[in-house]
Amino acid sequence: MRNNTVHKGFVMAAVVVVTFVGLLAQSPARQQLARGNALWDQRLANSAIAALEAAARDRGTASEAYEALGRLYTFKGWLQDNVFPGWHDEPEYREKALAALKASLAADAARASAQEALRVAEGFAAADKIDPAAPRPEVRALDVKLQSYQTTPDAPVSDIVAAIEARAKAQADPAPYFTGAQILIDHGEYDRAIAMAQRGVAASDRFIDENLSAYRMAGKSQGSYARGRGTAADLVGWALFLKKDYAAAAAKLEEAERLLQGLDFANEFHLGELARMQRRPARDYYVNALSLAGGPAPLRQRATEALAHLEGPGPVPTELDAWLEAELSRRRDQRKAAALESLVDRPLPKLTLTTVDGKPYDTAGLRGKVLLLNFFASW
Amino acid sequence: MPHLKTAYAKYQTDPGVAFLLVSIDDDSKRLQRYLNEMKFPFPVARAAAGQAEQVMGFDNIPSTFYVDREGIVRYEAGGSESHGDSPSRVSWLIDQLAHRQ
């Protein structure tokens, strides 16, 4: 009996707490805090920072909001190298991280989670090298779930779509849309795949916009925009090809080739399949594809087989392997040379240097020495 | 960058080896703050970002070039190369050039 009474009392207390939290959730500052945290979970940095900064201005949420900002800045300062393609650590956030965590403790000195976060950040500041952050476990689990549909040809389409949506909701990068579009293509759902790839473009653009400073060089963010758009164009083009709309497929696959600079295995393979179907010269596309790294083994196998059965002038079938090997290594070398346009084994070019305060820099003292020349930026 | 500091300790007194850092920052104030924070033991110069990227042909920051005594660039390590600037890798590259006849 006694236990029962205690139990009831507990339930009553729980109801009161839930109501109380419910009331608080309606305060604008607390809404901003919740919004900021959710946005950061999705890795939408700029919007998350704006919401958390708003919440930090309210005394009721300052401690929590500053802690969240401190954790976000810690990530930007020390943990984001290559977490997404093209991302770098942003050292200018390191001071901000320490300052935000101290501000959290200034607002609430007893806040244990902020004390812990500050201790971690100070450890990073003292360390030589920090390993980048691992993917969040819940995102990894959703990725695994989505990828499981690659090998289940009879899965209901609604399940696949739900898995794409769930992963896209958890983190805002475009990968689930592109992975999902490919799975939908494999399941014969071409129109759904096209729609999914198009949503991927919007997601990709927004994700880069929200994290622009993580790319540090304009060339890298531009490359990432182009990669997102190119990947989508290739998926759309391939779905159109499978729908036998060859003219529209050609337009999309060629757009993808321009965006991806002819350096994507799947895109070159798709262009080869299209050219073969349209009885245009296809050999170059297949060889291009095979000279690129990446692409699943079965597709590479299909590209090799397609080469063996092409009509028109080409290597004698019995010499195909040797011809292909020579051709592939020639192309790899060519690409390497073009991509690098490297200074290696060439004289150090003339470059105008100044001192930190803008006077001409005297390089006489460097002559005749082995020189390590490091180009850097504080951003 | 901390790796370069570590590697530099080995060559600080070697008259045959020089380190030069070149900043491509355009914001002088931010650069100065950064330098105050990093306290590099080696000389730092500045170059215009556009010119440096074009003349040196790098598309990554940081990028490191290793130049031999004759002024020929012998190695290049882009920012994305893993361990491109680990202390042992840096000193291995320098030693290759320092010991070359």
Image (cartoon, coloured by chain):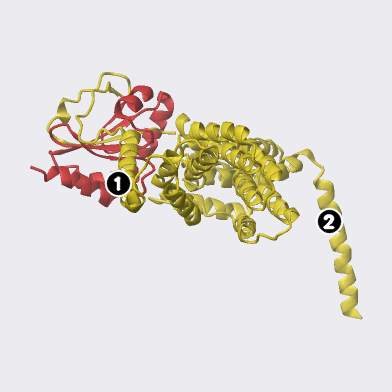
Chain colours: A yellow, B red
Question: Callout 2 environment at 10 Å: few (<14), some (14 to 19), or many (20+)?
Answer: few
- Quadrant assignment for the C terminus of chain A: top left
Q: Position of residue B8 (x, y in %)?
A: 24, 44
User: Is residue B68 visible to the viewer in this orientation of the structure?
Assistant: yes
* On screen, residue A209 above or below A9: above
User: Is residue A106 visible to the viewer in this orientation of the structure?
Assistant: no
Q: Which residue lies at the image location 61% right of the left edge and 40% below the top edge?
A: A241
Q: Which residue lies at the image location 51% right of the left edge and 47% below the top edge?
A: A83
Disc number lying in front (2 or 1)? 1
Dots 2 and 1 on the same chain: yes
Farthest residue, direction top: A359
Chain containing mark 2: A
Residue holding disc 2: A18
Mark drawn on residue A326:
1
Q: Earlier in the sequence, mark 2 or mark 1?
A: 2
Depth check, front residue: A241 or A119: A241
Question: Which amino acid, by three-letter code, is at mark 1?
Answer: Ala
Residues at marks 2 and 1, CA–CA distance in whole angstroms = 71 Å
Q: Which residue lies at the image location 89% right of the left edge and 79% below the top edge?
A: A2
Q: Secondary structure at mark 1?
A: helix
Q: Position of residue A118 (x, y in %)?
A: 54, 50
